[in-house]
Image: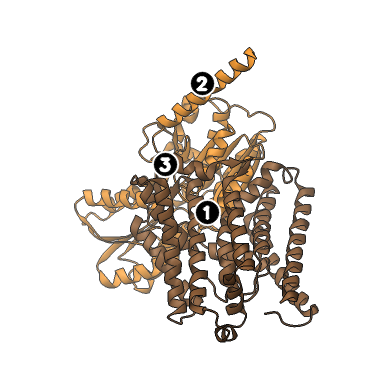
Amino acid sequence: MQHFLKGALAAGVFALSMGAAHADLAPLNSDSEPDRMDWSELDAKFGPLAAPAAGTKIGGVSKTLTNEYWRSLGQGYQNLADKLGVTLVYQAAANEGDQLGQLSIAEDLINQGFAALLLSPQTDANLIPAVEKAKAAGIPVLNVNDAVIPSAEHYVGNVQKGNGVNVANWFIQNRPDGGKVAVIEGQPGVYAAGQRTAGFTETINASGKFQVVASVPANWSREEAFNAATTILQQYPDLIGFYANNDGMALGVVEAVKAAGKQSQVAVFGTDGISDAYAAIKAGDLTGTVDSFPVLTGEIALEVSLRLLAGQKLPRVVATPQALITKDNIDTYSTQDIAALRAALLKK
Amino acid sequence: MNSIFKSIKFRDAGTLIGLILISVVFASLSPTFLTAPNLLNILQQSSINACIALGMTLVIISGGIDLSVGPVAALTAILGAAMMVAGVPIPVAILGALAAGAACGFVNGALIAWGGLQPFIVTLGGLSLYRALALIYTGGQPIFGLPDGFRALTNGTLASVPTPVIIVAVLAVLAWVILNKTPLGEYFMAIGGNPEAARIAGVPVVLTKLAAYMISGFMAAVAAMILIGRLGAAEPTMGTLWELDAIAASAIGGASLMGGRGSIPGTLIGCIILGTLRNGLTLLNVQAFYQLLATGIIIIVAMLIDKFASGAGGGKQG
C-alpha cells in the first residue's frame, strides 16, 4: 500500500512538473524563437551523432506527396534511416486540403510503437490532437517545416522570413536604381506565406529605392499566379521584378512575363528550389529561387530526432539551410550528392 | 411500402457485410487493427464525417443535396470559437454556433423551397459564400486558445468510449426516429420519391425542405464543435471537401441521389467503412493515393450492387 502511495505521489509530481513545463512553453514562432541554433552547429556543440538503439522506429507524416518538396523531405528521412539502420514509415494525406485525413494518419501511427514522430502539419492546428496524444504516450514530436504547431516542443525547418530577405537583397545589389516590384503570395493566413512576404517587403522597403506596387495571394497555384501576374504587368508596364512565395507560382509568373514579352526587363524569383525551378533557371526563364534543400532538411530532422532520443538537450528550434540560387551558382547547388551539398553550404 | 422497408433493411445487411469483409482483410494483415484502442480510434475518426453524413442523408432522401456543409462547419466553428475566446459562457457559445448552423441551413432551404432554385446550385453558392464569410471574419488566421472546459466536453470518454462517438450515436438515433417514426420522415421520403404526388397528397413541401436543410446545417455545426474541441483551435479553412465524404458515405449506405431512398444505419456503416479503409491502409503503410483508389472502388462497387439488387428485386423503388 505504502509502495503504491509513493508511486502515485511520484506520478503526481511528475505530472505536475510536466504540466508546468508545458505551461511555460510560449506559443512557438519558429522564426523569432530565441531558444534556437543553426543546423551547421550540431556536430560542434553536441558531438557526432551516436548510433541509434537497434530496432528504432521513426514515423513521418507530411502534407501530401503530390508536392515534390514533401517527396524530397521523405527521401532525406529515408537516406539517413537507411544509413543508420533505423526503420522509417513515411505517410502523407491525399491532398494539401485533407486536414482530417492527415490527423487520422498521425493518430494511427501513434498506436504503433514509434520512438519519435516527425510531423509536417497542413495547418497550424490540424495535428494538435495527435501532438497531445503523443505527449501523453511519451513519444517525442518534431514539427518539421512549415506550418507551426504553437505547442510544439521541437521545430526543425528553415527561417521563413529569410527566404524573402534573400530575394530582396538580390534586388538591392543587382538593381541599384530601384523600381517597381510585386509579390505573389501563398495562401492567406499560412505562416510561411506571411513570413516570406514580410521578409521581402520589409527588406526592400528599407532600401528606399523600391516600391512594392502589388502584393496579392495566388494560393500556391501556378494558374492563379499566371493570371495575377498578367494583370499586374498590364497595370504596371515598367515593373522590374516579381517575388513569388513558392516555385510553382513563380513558374506561372514566368509564363505571364514571357507572354508579355518582358523577359529582359522583369526578374522573377521563387522559393523552395524544386527541380522545375532549377531547370527554368538553367534555361534562363526564372531568375532565381531560394532553395531550402528538402532532402538535406529531412536528414537533419531525422538526426535531431535521434539526438533527442539519445537524451541530448537541443534548443527548441533547429534552423535548416537555405540559399539563393541563380545562374551564377546553380552548378554548385544542383548536385545530387548530398554530402557535397552539405560541404558547400557549410563553407558558405 | 412494406416491401420497400424490407429491401432497405436488406441493403443495410449488404453494407454491413462489406464492412465485415474489409475488417477481416485488415485484421489478417495487421496485428494492431483488431485492438480496442484502434477500433475506438476508427469510430472517433469517423464521427465527424458521420455527423455531417446524417444530415446529408436526410437532405438526399428529400431529393436534394447540400454542398455547403464544410464551409458551414468552418463558419460556425469560427463563430463559436470567437465567442468562447471573447469570454461568452461555453453553453451560450455552443448554442449560438448551433443556431448559426441551422440559420445557414435556413438560408439554403429558403432559396430552394421558396425561390424554387436548384439545390445543387444554391448550396454550391453557399459553399463559396460561407467559406468567404469565415475567411473574411478571421483574415485567414486560426483562432487559438479555446477554454479547457469546452475541450473537456469533446476529449473525454464515457465508459472508455470517446465522447464524439457517443454524441454521434445519440444524434443517429434521433435521425432514425425522425426518419422512421414521425410524419416528417414520411414527408422526406414522399417529396424525394415523387414531389408532385406528395404536393397533391397535402405534404407541406416548403416546410419539409426547410427542415431538411436546417437539420443539415445544424449537424454541420455539431461536427464543427466536435472538431474545434479536439483541435483546441478553429480554422477558416477547415471542412474542405467534407461534402464529398458525406455524400460518399450516404451513397455507400444506400441513399439514392434521385431521392426517396436512404438509410440512417446504412450511412453510419458507410462512414465506418471509409474510416476503416483509411485506418487499415495507414497501418499497412499504404500511401494515401491508394486510399483514394480504394474509396473510389468501394463507392462504385456499392452502386453496382445496388443496381443489380434492385433489378433482381423486380422493379422500381420509390
Along the line of sight, the residue nearer the viewer: A82 or B123: B123
Distance from label 2 to label 3 (Cα)?
24 Å
Chain to which mark 1 belongs: A
- Residue type highlighted by circle 2: Val
Whether labels 1 and 2 belong to a single chain: the reply is: yes
Q: Position of residue A191 (x, y in %)?
A: 39, 49
Along the line of sight, the residue nearer the viewer: B290 or B269: B269
Chain corresponding to brown in the figure: B
Q: In terms of image quadrants, where is residue A138?
A: top right
* Secondary structure state at the residue bearing disc 2: helix
The colour with which the image depicts chain A is orange
- Residue type highlighted by circle 1: Gln
Q: What residue sits 54% from the left and 29% below the top?
A: A308
Along the line of sight, the residue nearer the viewer: B14 or A30: B14
- Quadrant housing the C terminus of chain B: bottom right
Which residue matches tag 1?
A99
Q: What residue sits 64% from the left and 44% below the top?
A: A89
Chain to which mark 3 belongs: B
Q: Position of residue B237 (x, y in %)?
A: 44, 57
* Secondary structure state at the residue bearing disc 1: helix
Which residue matches tag 2?
A13
Q: Are marks 1 and 2 in contact (CB under 8 Å)?
A: no
Q: Is residue A329 above or below residue A10?
A: below
